[in-house]
């Protein structure tokens, strides 16, 4: 049964509001990339200090994501999102007022911890308040928001180039304050409320976001079953049978006493985050001017324009993916995405190798290099980009979700940092063409791995997911039929 338009709009508004901090993350990335020249001049910092400053965005989210897992289970998803706004506000203020490099690093570190919180909790929250029929759309909004924020940052740098870097950073202060106030209007995750034994509050939230009273009751019953609360307990406040576990207990279940299904899920979470970053898309985004220079584009303005087109292309195709995930499913789109990456990365590697070993301009290789860069970004954005966050959130059981997603973020940021730091050295060691041959090989391994390991999740409730795992092969069609029959009672 479809969710009424008014309630669908409310859920969409909630997901967009929760994703506002993702826009702030992207805005900081975009503004810092353009402002770093002015910062270097004003604060008299070295190239090494610049590299460390920019790497903080990958380092401190590791801390933030681990803290977010425990925090969101303790104070709730909504108040954790409010905390993110506070971290962004404090970090931005300190950065914009920094008299020296130490203060700038301190402010950027606080902001980086907030990034870790945002990467972990926003996809969790949106998945937990979304109906199964539109979970792919709503849970991929944060990924789109980050890239939209990057575009805003680049645009602000271009349009306000006469403004100081401090003023450009301060532009993110007011939105972070408004964001904190707006989040208080959002409902708490009904799954977190049930996990804490607050059945009355969970029932009220489910009535707000469900099609009917019957559907709200069924969703509540499914969540109670997943948490371990007997169906006969219907008081507004109850004591959960399985009390909230310590972090140590969660990690033990994930890695030591894991059932076959949980072990399969953890392997899926780690692998999808690993391969998303290991294919080297981050290198294309960060070093696109260098890649275009190697491809034969020598004009700075042309390189900047080409880089802007790359980022715009990435944002547009993520938007396309958000609209298609619930129609075509996660598995087909992820396999299509990696198939496109395999073709584009090997083609780009070949073109760059031809250009590097040619004594004259090879026009066809230059044009094809630019085209394959755009194609690789498009391929990544229709699958690997948004699906990583959607898939990992929805397959993790409620009892493991917060810290399981945090673990995925840590893997993601670690691999992203390694790829970002090693690209230039790797290009010198095995040539830039060789680097992309390596990325293409990793993408091929990823496609094979996903084909064998990842089952489809479209149309299933979050409480049904665990039953889809445990055997390393695609689930039989009859399970998909059963899932479709249950869509009238979606969680």
Image (cartoon, rainbow, N blue to C red):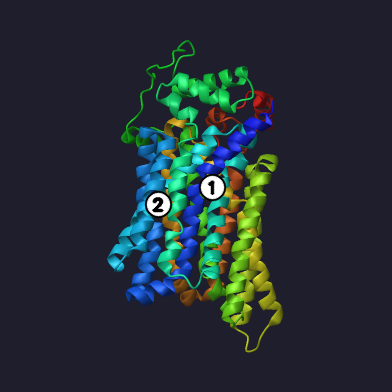
| Camera-side residue of 461 and 304 | 304
Around disc 2, counting alpha carbons within 10 Å, would you say few (fewer than 14), some (14 to 19), or many (20 or more)? many
Residue linked to disc 2: 88
Residue drawn at 59 percent across, 78 percent down: 301
Disc tally is 2
Tell me where residue 416 appears, x and y as whole percent.
Answer: 46, 59
- Considering every residue shown, the one lying at the far top of the view is 232
Residue drawn at 51 percent across, 39 percent down: 393
Residue linked to disc 1: 142
Tell me where residue 184 appears, x and y as whole percent.
Answer: 45, 36
Residue drawn at 45 percent across, 69 percent down: 35
Marker disc for residue 227: none
- Give SS at disc 2: helix
Q: In the rendered structure, are the residues bearing label 1 and label 2 in contact, judged by CB atoms less than 8 Å apart?
A: no
Question: Hey, which quadrant is residue 368 in on the image?
Answer: bottom right
Residue drawn at 53 percent across, 19 percent down: 221
Q: Nearer the viewer, mark 1 or mark 2?
A: 2
Tell me where residue 77 appears, x and y as whole percent.
Answer: 43, 36
- Give SS at disc 1: helix
Mark 1 vs mark 2, CA separation in Å:
16 Å
Question: Is 208 rendered above or below residue 71?
Answer: above
Quarter holding the N terminus is top right
Question: Is 303 rendered above or below residue 196?
Answer: below
Quarter holding the C terminus is top right
Around disc 1, counting alpha carbons within 10 Å, would you say few (fewer than 14), some (14 to 19), or many (20 or more)? many
Residue 393 can be seen, yes or no: yes
Question: Is 480 rendered above or below residue 89?
Answer: above
């Amino acid at each position: 049964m479809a969710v009424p338009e008014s309630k669908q709009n409310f859920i969409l508004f909630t997901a967009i509001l929760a994703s506002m901090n993702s826009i702030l993350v992207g805005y900081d990335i975009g503004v810092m990339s353009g402002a770093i020249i002015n910062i270097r001049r004003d604060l008299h910092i070295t190239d090494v200090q610049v590299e460390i400053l920019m790497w903080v965005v990958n380092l401190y989210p590791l801390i933030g994501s681990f803290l977010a897992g425990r925090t969101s289970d303790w104070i709730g998803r909504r108040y954790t999102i409010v905390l993110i706004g506070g971290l962004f506000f404090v970090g931005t203020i300190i950065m914009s007022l920094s008299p020296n490099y130490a203060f700038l690093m301190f402010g950027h570190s606080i902001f980086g911890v907030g990034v870790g919180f945002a990467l972990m909790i926003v996809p969790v929250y949106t998945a937990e308040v979304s109906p199964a029929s539109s979970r792919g759309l709503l849970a991929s909004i944060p990924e789109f928001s980050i890239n939209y924020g990057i575009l805003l940052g680049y645009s602000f740098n271009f349009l306000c180039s006469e403004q100081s870097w401090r003023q450009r950073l301060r532009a993110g202060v007011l939105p972070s304050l408004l964001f904190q106030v707006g989040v208080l209007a959002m409902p708490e995750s009904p799954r977190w409320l049930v996990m804490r034994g607050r059945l009355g509050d969970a029932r009220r939230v489910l009535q707000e976001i469900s099609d009917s009273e019957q559907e709200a009751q069924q969703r509540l019953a499914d969540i109670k079953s997943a948490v371990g609360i007997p169906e006969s307990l219907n008081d507004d406040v109850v004591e959960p049978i399985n009390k909230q576990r310590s972090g140590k207990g969660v990690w033990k279940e994930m890695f030591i006493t894991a059932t076959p299904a949980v072990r399969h899920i953890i392997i899926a979470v780690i692998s999808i985050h690993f391969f998303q970053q290991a294919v080297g898309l981050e290198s294309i985004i960060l070093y696109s001017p260098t890649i275009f220079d190697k491809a034969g584009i020598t004009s700075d303005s042309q390189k900047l324009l080409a880089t802007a087109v790359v980022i715009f292309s990435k944002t547009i195709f993520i938007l396309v993916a958000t609209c298609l995930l619930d129609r075509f499913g996660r598995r087909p789109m992820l396999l299509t995405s990696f198939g496109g990456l395999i073709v584009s990365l090997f083609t780009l590697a070949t073109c760059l190798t031809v250009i590097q070993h040619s004594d004259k301009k090879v026009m066809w290789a230059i044009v094809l290099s630019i085209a394959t860069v755009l194609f690789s970004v498009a391929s990544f954005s229709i699958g690997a980009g948004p699906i990583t966050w959607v898939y990992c959130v929805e397959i993790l059981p409620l009892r493991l979700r917060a810290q399981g997603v945090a673990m995925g973020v840590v893997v993601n940021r670690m691999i992203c940092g390694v790829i970002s730091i090693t690209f230039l050295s790797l290009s010198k060691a095995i040539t830039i063409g060789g680097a992309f041959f390596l990325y293409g090989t990793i993408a091929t391994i990823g496609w094979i791995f996903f084909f064998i390991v990842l089952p489809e999740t479209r149309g299933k409730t979050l409480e049904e997911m665990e039953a889809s795992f445990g055997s390393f092969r695609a689930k039989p069609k009859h399970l998909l039929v059963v899932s479709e029959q249950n869509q009238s009672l979606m969680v």
